[in-house]
Amino acid sequence: MSLVVQKYGGTSVGTIERIRNVASRVARTYDDGNDVVVVVSAMAGETNRLVALANEMCEFPSDREYDVLVSTGEQVTIALLSMCLQSMGYNAKSYLGSQIPMLTDNAHAKARIKAIEDKKIREDLKNGTIVIVAGFQGIDADGNVTTLGRGGSDTSAVAVAAALKADVCEIYTDVDGVYTTDPRMVPAARKIEKISYEEMLEMASLGAKVLQIRSVEFAKKYGVVIHVRSSFDDKPGTLVMKEDEEMETVLVSGIAFNKDETKISIFGVPDHPGIAAQIFSPLSHANITVDMIIQNVSSDGATDMTFTVPKADFKKALKIVEEVAKEIGARGVSSDDSIAKISIIGVGMRSHSGIASKMFQTLAQERVNIQMISTSEIKVSCVIDAKYTELAVRVLHEAFGLSLETDDEE
Ligand code: ADP
Ligand code: ASP
Ligand code: MG
């Protein structure tokens, strides 16, 4: 007998019919003799709808109330799934994050899981009950509802799997695995059979939303093997696991893109020690994550700085930066909210040179201008004009030999 954690995403629970389909998959796993814990997302589109309502109500909704609102989508699906399983004759019980409890820190809208109380879940499993947990949500030490950031149900599932030492953590979604790039943008994308935690971490943090970044961090830390697969068929998906020798032979294993960032530049910044801290501390205090940062060579004691922040924090960040710019006597601030970051990822890059220059050449051939560059051991990222996203991803996918051969197509 195994303990299986299954997570079903928004599309998989998007209608009553689809929730029935999920219930029958869960029932099948249970009938095979397994203990089953299910983590579900809100119905497709529901969290977006709730976020839009919050933004319609006021320009800067308070973080606490935002979480109270956007966490409600999952309450609907856990109850519906549980009802469906009960009507099929199974014992099923739903839990909100606060009922487990799933303890998090108090960083609303991007809370981190600190501990999961497994007592109730274990008791239920012992009694033959199928446990259904609301993804994406938790509770902080003061009893406030928190949410884990968009796509956070993946993290809920992996954290539950780690806490229960589950045998498998299956993430069911609307594609049948992790592909070399988003298969919805590039139809020639290829399914990856096995991918290392490191590569998946880069893919996720660079824009491939198939798994939330933190879910991969958690999986890596606790050695949870994630199986990403489709809730609409039974094909094997992608295993996210520890790196093996086979993986290292592939130079570039995937291409990611992110259109959710924006660029802010500060010009004529007085260049002296402490100035970067003066600019970036207020952003970090406001819980805004700054991604790429470029500082130009200074001339006449002044320099320019350009950095990227998530689209969701753009207005807040710009306001802060404009205030800081005045305080420090900078010449001005400009911004661009139509950029895209394109990245190539592969553990094989560690031992090969020339990958970055091949990326730059490929973009140059298409006359795509590179605005910012950043590299790490296993990735190269370029910021470009958002209107070239699809073109850039397609040509890079082709240039690095990732595209399916036409006669290879499934
Ligand atoms: P869920 O609601 O099940 O959590 P998501 O929409 O969060 O599903 O994630 C699945 C989506 O991720 C797919 O529909 C696909 O468009 C997108 N995606 C982006 N990059 C990739 C990739 N490299 N491989 C697979 N899917 C990807
Ligand atoms: N429902 C949440 C969202 O849309 C969490 C998730 O789907 O993972 O972001
Ligand atoms: Mg998701």
Image: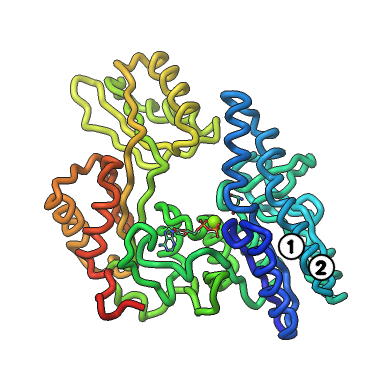
Which of discs 1 and 2 lies nearer the camera? The answer is 1
Q: Indicate whether 45 appears above or below 242.
A: above
Q: Which mark is residue 92?
A: 2
- Residue behind label 2 places its C-beta within 8 angstroms of ligand 2: no
Label 1–label 2 contact, CB within 8 A = yes
Q: Nearer the viewer, residue 197 or 86?
A: 86
Residue 359 can be seen, yes or no:
yes
Q: Earlier in the sequence, mark 1 or mark 2?
A: 1
Three-letter code, disc 1: Leu
Is 293 left, or right, of 195 in this rendering?
A: left
Colour convention: rainbow
Is 304 left, or right, of 155 in this rendering?
A: left
Residue drawn 44% across and 36% down? 311
- Please state the horizontal and vertical placement of residue 133, each as a whole percent of the image: 73, 60
Is disc 1 surrounded by few (<14), some (14 to 19) or many (20+) residues within 10 Å?
Answer: many
Q: Residue 409's quadrant in the figure?
A: bottom left
Q: Indicate whether 69 appears above or below 303.
A: below
Residue drawn 42% across and 14% down? 327
Q: Residue 251's quadrant in the figure?
A: bottom left
- Residue behind label 1 places its C-beta within 8 angstroms of ligand 2: no
Q: Secondary structure at mark 1?
A: helix
- Please state the horizontal and vertical placement of residue 398, each as a whole percent of the image: 22, 65
Quarter the N terminus occupies: bottom right
Q: Indicate whether 41 appears above or below 85.
A: above
Q: Which mark is residue 345?
A: none
Residue at mark 1: 81
Three-letter code, disc 2: Ala
Question: How many labels were placed on the picture?
Answer: 2
Q: Secondary structure at mark 2?
A: strand
- Please state the horizontal and vertical placement of residue 306, each as a whole percent of the image: 31, 32
